[in-house]
Image (cartoon, grey):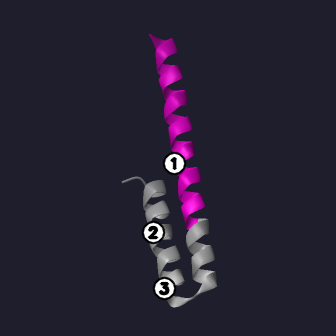
Amino acid sequence: MTEGKGREVSGRVKEAAGALKGDDEMRREGRKDQKQGKLEQARDRISDAAEDVKDAFKK
């Protein structure tokens, strides 16, 4: 599991725990963590695509 996916999953857990406890701050933190995780995953995909393009020009 990548760091981004891990952060997204932990954010989901944190948001759910906040919902169960009635803790709005924890829910917000969970949503923030999920967004950060998704951004990290997108960054990784872009980086991988850039590497693929770079490798294609080497051949």
Q: Position of residue 36 (x, y in %)?
A: 59, 59
Q: Are marks 1 and 3 in contact (CB under 8 Å)?
A: no
In the foreground, 16 or 30: 16
How far is the residue under mark 1 from the one under mark 3? 28 Å
Query: Is-magenta flag for residue 47?
Result: yes
Q: Position of residue 53 (x, y in %)?
A: 52, 21
- Please tell me whether mark 1 or mark 3 is closer to you in this view: 3
Judging by the rendered image, the residue that carries numbered circle 2 is: 10
Judging by the rendered image, the residue that carries numbered circle 3 is: 20
Relative vertical location of residue 50 with respect to residue 4 in this rendering, above or below: above
Q: Is residue 46 left or right of residue 10?
A: right
Q: Main secondary structure of the magenta part?
A: helix
User: Mark 1 or mark 3: which comes first in sequence?
Assistant: 3
Q: Residue at x 41, y 52 (%)?
A: 2
Relative vertical location of residue 43 with respect to residue 13 in this rendering, above or below: above
Q: Which mark is residue 50?
A: none
Q: Position of residue 42 (x, y in %)?
A: 55, 44
Query: Image quarter for residue 3?
Result: bottom left
Which range is magenta?
Answer: 33-59
User: Mark 2 or mark 1: which comes first in sequence?
Assistant: 2
Three-letter residue code for mark 3: Leu
Q: Residue at x 58, y 81 (%)?
A: 26
Three-letter residue code for mark 2: Ser
Q: Position of residue 58 (x, y in %)?
A: 48, 13
Q: Residue at x 58, y 87 (%)?
A: 23
Judging by the rendered image, the residue that carries numbered circle 1 is: 41
